[in-house]
Image (cartoon, helix red, strand yellow):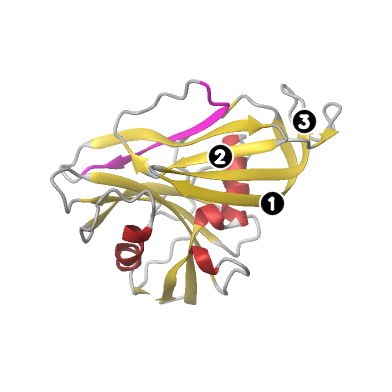
Amino acid sequence: MAVIHKTTLTPGKLELLTSWLPSQPWYEGGERHPELARAGGFRLDDPQGEVGIEFMVVTDDSGDETLSYLVPLTYRGAPLDGADHALIGTTEHGVLGPRWVYDGTHDPVLVAQLLALLQGEAEPQAQSESNTTDPTVVSGFTGPRITGPVTSTAATSGPRCTDIAVRAGTVAPEGTEGAGEGPQRDQDGGLVIRVNRVLLPGEEDTTGAQGHVTAGWRLPDGTDARSVFATVRTTTP
């Protein structure tokens, strides 16, 4: 389970995001300089124990109304090959040393674990506590189960969301639980995971989705909010 080090991070996450957010197509603050606060989120474990995975919610209070953004992050001890375009920045961790911070929608480790969460194969972890699951994060999946390693991912961002096209080794028929429990076929399609970047409190409609993740965060006035963080649909060639 995730180990949270109580130490320094220089520069801090909010400093990195304050510089990075305005250049994203889903940023709704116009030319304003964002005023960010951490508002919630959760973590996932990397099975190899090498990559930190965090789904962070930040609120921006720079305008007339508060905006809430979901930023999936990965933390690595070395640069990720071919991902310079997804680099948010570098920082110095008081225990782990230099860390490369990425937009996690472009990181195959995060995408694989998000898929595992959707399929009920990974447990969400508390954002700020070690070895603690987060039961407030709810996921479900009704589509054909993808088994085997993720072989490719491609993320495309637009207004309000990022779509991640995912391909893996095999697809198990709907209703089976994975390898060895029914005939499988080579994958001839894939999944698109939509990560909602702009979070709207109370928006939990998942009609038409074959999978979803919902979770909560806290608004600046102390109000608790929930929304859909991600949905998934299958695709065909």
Nearer to the camera, 32 or 65: 32
Number of the front mark, 3 or 2: 2
> Residue 180's spot in the image, x, y percent?
85, 33
Residue flagged by tag 2: what amino acid is it?
Ile
Please name the residue that numbered disc 2 is placed on: 193
Number of the front mark, 3 or 1: 1
Residue 24 quadrant: bottom left
The reply to whether discs 3 and 1 touch (Cβ–Cβ < 8 Å) is no
How far apart are the two marked residues, 2 and 1, measured between alpha carbons? 13 Å
Give the residue drawn at x 24%, y 51%: 29
Main secondary structure along the magenta-highlighted residues: strand
Give the residue drawn at x 84%, y 31%: 184
Q: Based on the picture, tell me whether residue 43 belongs to the magenta stretch.
A: no
Circle 1 residues within 10 Å: few <14, some 14–19, many ≥20 = some
Q: Is residue 235 left or right of residue 37?
A: right
Please name the residue that numbered disc 1 is placed on: 152
Q: Which mark identifies residue 172? A: 3
Residue flagged by tag 1: what amino acid is it?
Ser
**Image vertical order of residue 195 relative to residue 5, above or below:** above
Q: Which residues are magenta?
A: 208-219
Circle 3 residues within 10 Å: few <14, some 14–19, many ≥20 = many
Circle 2 residues within 10 Å: few <14, some 14–19, many ≥20 = many
Q: Give the secondary structure at mark 1.
A: strand
Nearer to the camera, 115 or 200: 200
Q: Give the secondary structure at mark 2.
A: strand
> Residue 44's spot in the image, x, y percent?
52, 50
